[in-house]
Amino acid sequence: MRKLFALLAVSGSLVFLSGCMVDAAATRGHFDRTLKVSGAVDLDVQSGAGDIAVRTGGSGTVVVHARIYASHWNAGDIEHRVHYLESHPQIEQNGNTIRVGHTNDRDLMHNISISYEVIVPAETKLHASSGSGDERIDGMHGPVDASSGSGHVTLSHIGSQATAHTGSGDIDLNSVHGNVKAGTGSGSIHATGIAGGFSASTGSGDVRLEQTAPGKVNIGTGSGSIEIRGANGAVDAHTGSGNIAAQGQPKGDWTLHTASGSLNVTFPGTAAYDLVAHTGSGGIHIRHTIEFNGKWMPHNVQGKVGGGGPAVDLNTSSGSIRID
């Protein structure tokens, strides 16, 4: 008898789980739309709680693929609302200006998220915003402005200036031909192939930059290391706790400060600059091939290198300073 009750209980559980799986499948939806355009596109994509992916395709069309997810499949009229969104996609078009995902109807979107994949012509200007989702943007001319409340932001092969922000998540930037602004509340910022100025800030995380064209660099992190390669202009880099390693040409003033960490700077042998270096506890080392004249003390160095030039200000409260 006990075995019979056990079998009945297991059977009932399986039926219940099976019903849940059916309900879950029934409250997922999707829609696909193709929009005709002519010329450059101005695209604005918004998702309250979903991912956004935008990439380039052929000219003359904007293709929208949407995937709808219900987080609580048994919450009232959720299935009806999913079906409504399938048949009434949140897409607005006025010529070459397109808005995707914009709505003020909170009741309609309650417990529902929509992820978008949008395929656009290369000549596209983009604004993308997600409340809590990742964003992947690739291949368009731009400019691009991408933001997420809590998610990773990835921008690749952008033909002009770009802006990327997230409340908590990493930012990855690759091959941007223009000025970049990037900020995250808590996460790392990695940027390669940046052909222009670069401004980045993070509350807690590392920042790595590879710059391929001249432009001012401004980097700040509350706690994290900073690595800069290929700088060719002014540099201002600060961290509360972390090392700073910077390589490039001092064609403008350089200011590198860390409260607790080491500073490692690499200049070409022909570099000319006015040096001020201070460390609270640590040594100061300068390559012998660099000519130096001026004031030198164990924790403070001032003088001209290569005849002088832009100011190079290096400061650490606890750490060593090295110039190669």
Image (cartoon, rainbow, N blue to C red):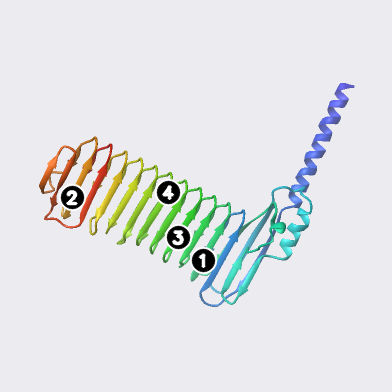
Q: Residues within 10 Å of mark 3 (few under 14, many from 20)?
A: some
Label 3: which secondary element: strand
Q: Residues within 10 Å of mark 1 (few under 14, many from 20)?
A: many
Residue occupied by mark 4: 202
Please name the residue shown 50% across and 48% down the image.
169
Relative to 273, is 115 on the left or the right? Answer: right
Query: Would residue 324 be visible to someone looking at this image?
Result: no
Label 4: which secondary element: strand
Relative to 236, is 151 on the left or the right? Answer: right
Whether pointer 2 and pointer 3 mark residues with C-beta atoms closer than 8 Å, the reply is: no
Check disc 3 and give the amino acid type. Thr
Establish if 48 lies above or below 37. above
Residue occupied by mark 1: 126
Rounded to the nearest angstrom, the CA distance separating label 1 from label 3 is 10 Å
In which image quadrant can residue 85 be found?
Answer: bottom right
Earlier in the chain: of badge 2 and badge 4, it is 4
Q: Which mark is residue 275?
A: 2
Earlier in the chain: of badge 1 and badge 2, it is 1
Residue occupied by mark 3: 163
